[in-house]
Amino acid sequence: MQPSVADMAHDDAGPAEPTLGSRRFGLATLAIAVVAALLAGFAIGVLALRPAAAPADDSPEAGFARDMITHHDQAVEMGMIAYTEAELPGVRQIAYDIATNQQGEIGMMHQWLREWELGPTAAEPPMAWMPDGDAMGGAPMPGMASRDQMAELREAEGIAVDQLFLELMIDHHLGGIHMIDGVLELTDHSEVVWLAELMKSGQQHELEVLRNLQQQAADHSG
């Protein structure tokens, strides 16, 4: 039986055009997929930007911040004494640098405590956050000068200011680096790690300067 003219016309027409309903369905599916992808990306971004949980009151991070604020406070005082009273220009310069740098770091650590909603003091004794509770030479924290040593620095005159400042600040920096190494072993908090590493590199550089100045002060007094 021969195909009719109508059948031949239908075959030549090719596949049927999509209907309006099918086009709408395809566009709706595409829109849903795009929205789902955007929401997934937004969720990933929110999770990535979400801040780490605030350290607890008895955490190494909180203990380090509180103790290092106290440690820095003394360094600032020592630095300002030497800045105004030392004889050697190099000693006055490093004293000023130490005082201003550490004052800035004090501000950052106070800001941490505010963000963590923690007070500036704790019930635990100094250095309790470190496993061995390190304190050296009877001082409340490693490297800190005693009250008698601070009184001696305040009363010193001439090149004796330079010499005593350099001696005390070298010990102070060594103690500070000891504390920094302690917290770096105990924390993975990004802000604490960043500032601790910055402190360590800065104080290691300053130690070289302080030791060179010690020789200059010795030559000056001789």
Image (cartoon, grey):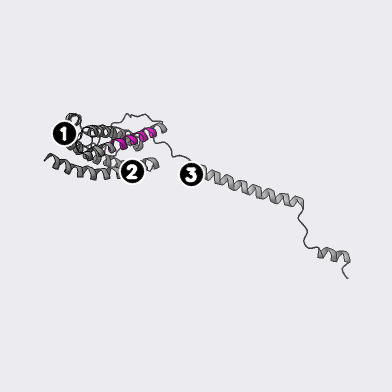
* Circle 3: element type: helix
Q: Earlier in the sequence, mark 1 or mark 2?
A: 1
Viewer-side residue, 115 vs 159: 159
Q: Position of residue 179 (x, y in %)?
A: 28, 40
Q: Position of residue 70 (x, y in %)?
A: 29, 32
List the residue tagged with mark 2.
198
Q: Residues within 10 Å of mark 2 (few under 14, many from 20)?
A: few
Can residue 38 be seen here? The reply is yes
Instruction: Decide whether residue 182 is among the magenta residues.
Output: no
Q: Nearer the viewer, mark 1 or mark 3?
A: 1
Can residue 134 be seen here? The reply is no
Quarter of the image where one finds residue 97 = top left
Question: Does 122 sit left or right of 169 as displayed?
Answer: right
Q: Give, as a three-letter code, the residue at label 2.
A: Leu
* Magenta-colored span: 98-112
- The residue sitting at 18% across, 36% down in the picture is 164
* Circle 1: element type: loop
List the residue tagged with mark 1.
158
Quarter of the image where one finds residue 117 = top left
| Label placed on residue 48 | 3
Quarter of the image where one finds residue 146 = top left
Q: Position of residue 53 (x, y in %)?
A: 43, 38
Number of numbered discs overlaid on the protein picture: 3
Q: Earlier in the sequence, mark 3 or mark 2?
A: 3
Q: Give, as a three-letter code, the residue at label 3.
A: Ala
Viewer-side residue, 116 vs 160: 160
- The residue sitting at 73% across, 52% down in the picture is 23
Question: Does 32 sit left or right of 97 as displayed?
Answer: right
Q: Residues within 10 Å of mark 3 (few under 14, many from 20)?
A: few
